[in-house]
Image: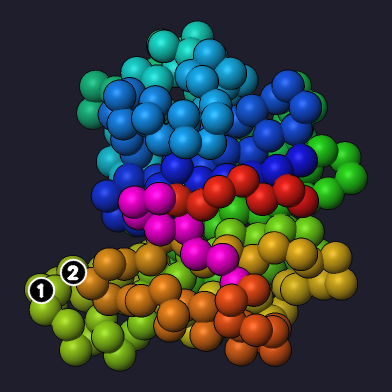
């Protein structure tokens, strides 16, 4: 089982999780051409996609999903709320599979555990993937950490955790006050320190990959996110990966 990233941040997100012939994309915040180019960097063709999961309707996550799924002739999995919102935006997928609450489901060789997160979208979900032996937990776009999130993400073999901003940088930065409030709010985005506290709680013996995700280009820096997560584990800074906006993250074998 392996995972990789096509790009992560407010300008567009997309992740890949693969086990055997099953290749799932999580979010598609890129247009079909850009997504195709970024897939090629990871050696994947559009036709290789088994399914696309959409975490929520924000354009950096949902923008390209319907078009790419049509090209790949694969289903899009999403919550009722995300589907309704994409529908209202005129970008609902032709072939939608609705995620039933928090029920575990399978696509090919991967088992998917959806879990709800507090974020300012209609019905945002994040996911834990398993091939039966190992688990990869993905978490972006959450304003705070719930007890349920801690439970679901505990003991994963690999984690990609949102490190959106450094609170001091955001507060001192040039964003409008209303936007700062939204990002810092209970339904906004996770900051480095909160992600580090979460990581400290959920890290188990089997953890072999940690990647910082959805970094703000203005209100964060890769070294700050790395330092925060490394501090939570007491590991070297360069052991922590960063999925960035332009290059994403190369495949990591779990
Ligand atoms: Zn986002
Ligand atoms: Zn969002």
The prevailing secondary structure element of the residues shown in magenta is loop
Q: Quadrant of the N terminus?
A: top right
Q: Is 242 part of what is drawn in magenta? A: yes
Q: Is residue 19 above or below residue 95?
A: below
Q: Is residue 240 at all visible to an observer of this figure?
A: yes
Quarter of the figure with residue 236: bottom right
Residue 227 x %, y %? 52, 85
Q: Residue 7 got which mark?
A: none
Residue 235 falls inside the magenta stretch: no
Q: Residue at x 60, y 72 (%)?
A: 240
Callout count = 2
Residue ID for mark 2: 179
Give, as a single range, the part of the protein colored magenta.
Answer: 240-247
Disc 1 crowd rating (10 Å Cα; few below 14, some 14-19, many 20+) is few
Mark 1, secondary structure of its residue: loop
Q: Quadrant of residue 3?
A: top right
């Amino acid at each position: 089982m392996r995972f990789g990233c096509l790009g992560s941040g407010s300008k567009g997100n997309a992740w890949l999780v693969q086990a055997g012939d099953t290749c799932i994309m999580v979010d598609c915040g890129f247009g079909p051409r850009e997504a195709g180019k970024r897939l090629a960097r990871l050696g994947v063709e559009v036709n290789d996609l088994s399914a696309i999961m959409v975490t929520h309707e924000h354009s950096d996550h949902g923008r390209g999903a319907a078009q790419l799924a049509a090209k790949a002739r694969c289903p899009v999995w999403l919550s009722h709320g995300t589907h309704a919102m994409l529908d209202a935006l005129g970008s609902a997928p032709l072939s939608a599979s609705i995620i039933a609450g928090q029920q575990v489901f399978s696509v090919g060789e991967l088992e998917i555990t959806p879990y709800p997160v507090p974020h300012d979208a209609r019905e945002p979900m994040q996911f834990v993937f398993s091939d039966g032996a190992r688990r990869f937990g993905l978490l972006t776009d959450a304003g705070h950490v719930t007890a349920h999130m801690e439970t679901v993400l505990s003991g994963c073999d690999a984690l990609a955790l949102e490190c959106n901003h450094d609170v001091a940088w955001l507060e001192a930065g040039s964003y409008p006050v209303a936007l700062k409030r939204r990002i810092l709010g209970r339904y906004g985005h996770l900051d480095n320190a909160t992600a580090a506290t979460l990581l400290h709680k959920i890290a188990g013996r089997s953890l072999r990959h940690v990647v910082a995700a959805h970094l703000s280009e203005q209100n964060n820096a890769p070294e700050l996110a790395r330092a925060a997560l490394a501090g939570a584990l007491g590991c070297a800074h360069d052991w922590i990966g960063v999925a960035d906006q332009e290059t994403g993250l190369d495949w990591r074998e779990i």
